[in-house]
């Protein structure tokens, strides 16, 4: 009976391990840290395509970027909710305008070329600032890919107005689901409860001998 329990627990753990392993390759493709040079000339010459709006005077911030030149298929666009606070005029660090954003708005992405994945989420926080000749927008986000995987990340877009150039960055990673962690813990418990009685019997026999 002990061997049967051990065999069942081992098989269960194998099945638990196989599921994360099959998802690992996909997760690796969806965990990225990207940056790209942006040309803000209109129309923007391909493959660079970025836009940003700091939301001056209390408006929502927004940004978009196409990373095709460095990572085919990857793009993002977002728009925040209205700012929870902002400064116009003489602000900290010499900014002419700065704003802080909270939970709300939308964040959308497309993933690696060939996978056909899209991402829908929302902005969880962000900030923007305008130095007069430079402007940047930043957003933290959370949401789900079209294959069901949950992810979080950060995105930013900035422009140097005199040169009409700038850059964009994107960092995102998959977040393990609580159900997956519970399944793995369940497997470990099943193995422990199966092995413990057998190990205890062996120790008793050794003690008697």
Image: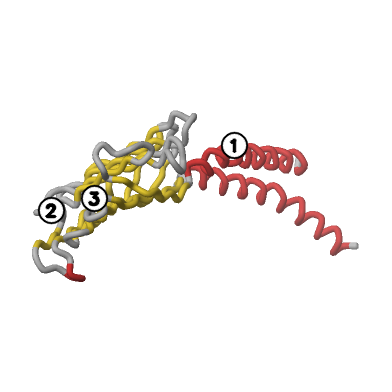
141 w.r.t. 92: above or below: above
Q: Are marks 2 and 1 in contact (CB under 8 Å)?
A: no
Q: Which residue is mark 3?
A: 103
Q: Position of residue 152 (x, y in %)?
A: 38, 48
Give the spatial CA distance, label 2 vs label 1.
Answer: 46 Å
**Residue in view at x 81 percent, y 59 percent:** 204
The residue sitting at the front extreme is 163
Q: Nearer the viewer, mark 2 or mark 1?
A: 2
40 w.r.t. 96: above or below: above
Give the spatial CA distance, label 2 vs label 3.
Answer: 19 Å
Q: Position of residue 37 (x, y in %)?
A: 37, 49
Disc 3 element: loop
Q: Which numbered disc flags the more N-terminal residue, 1 or 3?
A: 1
Q: Is residue 188 left or right of residue 207?
A: left
Q: Quadrant of the C terminus?
A: bottom right
Q: Nearer the viewer, residue 146 or 166?
A: 166
């Amino acid at each position: 009976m002990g061997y049967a329990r051990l065999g069942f627990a081992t098989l269960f753990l194998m099945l638990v391990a196989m599921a994360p392993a099959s998802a690992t390759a996909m997760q690796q493709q969806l965990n990225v840290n990207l940056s790209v040079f942006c040309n803000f000339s209109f129309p923007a010459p391909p493959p660079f395509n970025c836009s940003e709006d700091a939301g001056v005077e209390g408006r929502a911030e927004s940004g978009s970027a196409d990373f095709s030149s460095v990572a085919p298929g990857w793009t993002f666009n977002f728009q925040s909710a209205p700012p929870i606070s902002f400064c116009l005029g003489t602000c900290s660090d010499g900014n002419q305008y700065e704003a802080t954003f909270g939970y709300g708005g939308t964040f959308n992405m497309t993933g690696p070329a060939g996978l056909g994945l899209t991402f829908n989420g929302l902005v969880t926080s962000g900030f923007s600032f305008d130095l007069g000749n430079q402007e940047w927008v930043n957003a933290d986000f959370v949401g789900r890919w079209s294959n069901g995987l949950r992810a979080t990340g950060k995105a930013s877009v900035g422009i140097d107005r005199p040169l009409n150039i700038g850059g964009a960055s994107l960092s995102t990673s998959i977040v393990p689901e609580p159900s997956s962690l519970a399944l793995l813990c369940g497997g470990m418990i099943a193995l422990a409860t199966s092995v413990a009685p057998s190990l205890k019997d062996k120790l008793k026999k050794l003690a008697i001998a």
